[in-house]
Image (cartoon, rainbow, N blue to C red):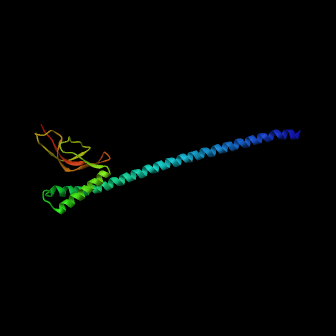
Amino acid sequence: MDEENKQPEQPLEDTSIIDTLKQQADDYLKGWQTERANLLNYQRDENERISKMVTLNERNMILEILSIVDNFDLLIKNLDQNKKDEYIDGINLIYNKLIEFLNHHKCFSFESINQIFDPNMHEAVETIEDNTKENNIVIEEIQKGYKLNDIVLRPAKVKVNINKN
């Protein structure tokens, strides 16, 4: 009779061991899934951080190049373009290569003259009163403005017409 009592206990023990192992396997699976999700989130966050850092570095590099382009703009503005000279041709060639480089990186200058003054795109360095022209119109561009990926990278420095009538 003792033997009969022991036999039913054996399957109960096997069932409890199986249930324990299933529970343990489920716990391991949940832990693995959580850690996998954490890894994917970390990788995504790290990729975003690197992308922002690259974008910031590109922006800073382009801003430095823009100061060189500004110097070329002043030089070309003050050169006698009618005079044929190899140096003038060389200056124009270098300037055009710089502009190509900026355009390749999606950095473009934008037109300001005869546009309505927009504080998001223009920095007013002087106001002029001219009743023959419309109010809040950009009269002169002192320094070109540039956009990088359609976002204003540097506003144009301009003179604006203000009518006091």
The answer to which image quadrant residue 75 occupies is bottom left
The answer to which image quadrant residue 117 occupies is top left
Asked whether, in this view, residue 80 is left or right of residue 72, the answer is left
Q: Position of residue 132 (x, y in %)?
A: 10, 39
Asked whether, in this view, residue 22 is left or right of residue 45, the answer is right
Q: Could you tell me how many numbered marks the image carries?
A: 0
The one nearer the camera, 89 or 75, is 89
Q: Is residue 160 visible?
A: yes
Q: Position of residue 55 (x, y in %)?
A: 37, 51
Asked whether, in this view, residue 20 is left or right of residue 134, the answer is right
Image quarter where the N terminus lies is top right
Outermost residue, right direction?
1
The one nearer the camera, 7 or 97, is 97
Image quarter where the C terminus lies is top left
Q: Position of residue 94 (x, y in %)?
A: 24, 59
The answer to which image quadrant residue 96 occupies is bottom left
Q: Position of residue 59 (x, y in %)?
A: 33, 52
The one nearer the camera, 86 or 136, is 86
Q: Is residue 131 above or below residue 144?
A: above
Residue under the image location 18 percent in, 56 percent down: 76
Q: Is residue 153 visible?
A: no
